[in-house]
Structures are given as structure tokens and as C-alpha cells.
Image (cartoon, grey):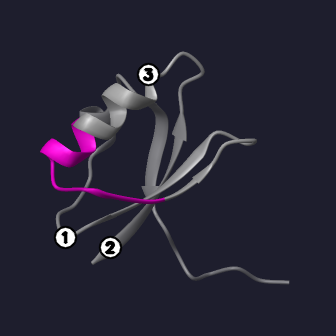
Amino acid sequence: MKIYLAVLRKDVDLKEFKMFLKDQKIELTDHYKVIGIVKLKSDKKLLEKDFEKFCESIEEEKDNFTI
């Protein structure tokens, strides 16, 4: 499973977004409400164009943090 981070649009209807995710068999694992970011889990590759209605951007989570 791949994990993705997405920045939600300010005017997004969360109920509609959750229904979309359920239809696409995508799991919403976390919702960081204060900063408007969601964490999604999916077996298939998620494309930004499929989420234009709900998200400003979406990308695969990477383990490349450095200090």
C-alpha cells in the first residue's frame, strides 16, 4: 500500500470527498484539520488530476526527511 498526502481545497465538501474516496476504495487514514491536509492509503497510484475537485495537490509520501 502506498501513502499519499493531499492539501484540501478551502471550499471542499468533506462528506462528498469521503464518498468519493469510498467509491475509489481509498482509505482516509488521517485528517489534519488545522492545516487542511489528509493522509490517504491506496493500492493504486493516485493522480492529481483525479482529485482536482477536492485537493490543491497530492503526492506520495516519502521517507526522505533530513535534519
Classify mark 1: helix, strand or loop: loop
Q: Magenta residues? A: 20-29
Q: Quadrant of the C terminus?
A: bottom right
Of the two numbered discs 3 and 2 in the rendering, the one whose residue sits closer to the viewer? 3
Pointer 1: what residue? Answer: 43
Q: Quadrant of the N terminus?
A: bottom left
CB atoms of marks 2 and 1 within 8 Å: yes
Which mark identifies residue 4? Answer: none
Pointer 3: what residue? Answer: 13
CB atoms of marks 1 and 3 within 8 Å: no
Q: Label 3 amino acid?
A: Asp
Q: Mark 2 packing: few (<14 Cα in 10 Å), some, or many (20+)?
A: few
Classify mark 3: helix, strand or loop: loop
Residue 24 shown in magenta: yes
Classify residue 50 by image quadrant: top left
Q: Residue at left 17%, top 64%?
A: 44
Q: Position of residue 16 (x, y in %)?
A: 32, 26
